[in-house]
Amino acid sequence: MNRSRQLPPVPRVEELKVRSCRALKDLHLEELTPLTALLGPNGSGKPAVFDVFAFLSECFTEGLRRAWGRRGRFKELRTRGAGSPIVIELKYREQPGTPLLTNRLEVDEGRDGPFL
């Protein structure tokens, strides 16, 4: 008996922009595929790209303050010397053939902590 089930389509990120986050002063990755390799010298921010996705996930599951605090607040999270907010922009499709959607998140710090 064949009980194979087709899994629902997974949203696919096609473009990523990050500004002022860790080593990612101004990153723009286009035409991302399901298998994308990141190559670069030490200190160029490869792990920071993956942490952007972890940070977003934690923001939505555990809250901004917890995700922000876990990463050393803006002292460690924001690019050194940057005075601008952290900006993360994702362009993705919910499933193949659907319109390209854009989500943009800007995080800054005020007297009472982080805010969007």
Image (cartoon, rainbow, N blue to C red):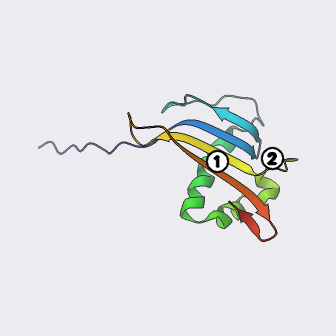
Mark 1 residue element: helix
Label 2 sits on residue: 79
Residue at the left extreme of this rendering? 1
Where is residue 30 shown, x and y percent of the image? 59, 30
| Quadrant in which residue 112 is drawn | bottom right
In the image, taking residue 9 as reference, residue 110 lies left or right, namely right
Does residue 74 show up? yes
Measure how far apart labels 1 and 2 are at the Cα level.
Answer: 13 Å
Tag 1: amino acid: Val
Q: Residue at x 21, y 43 (%)?
A: 4
Tag 2: amino acid: Thr
In the image, taking residue 108 as reference, residue 99 lies left or right, namely left
Numbered mark located on residue 87 in the image: none
Label 1 sits on residue: 52
Q: Quadrant of the N terminus?
A: top left
Q: Sequence-wise, which precedes: disc 1 or disc 2?
A: 1
Residue at the front extreme of this rendering? 99
Where is residue 46 shown, x and y percent of the image? 68, 37
Where is residue 103 shown, x and y percent of the image? 57, 47
Where is residue 54 shown, x and y percent of the image? 60, 52
Q: Residue at x 76, y 67 (%)?
A: 113
In the image, taking residue 54 as reference, residue 35 lies left or right, namely left
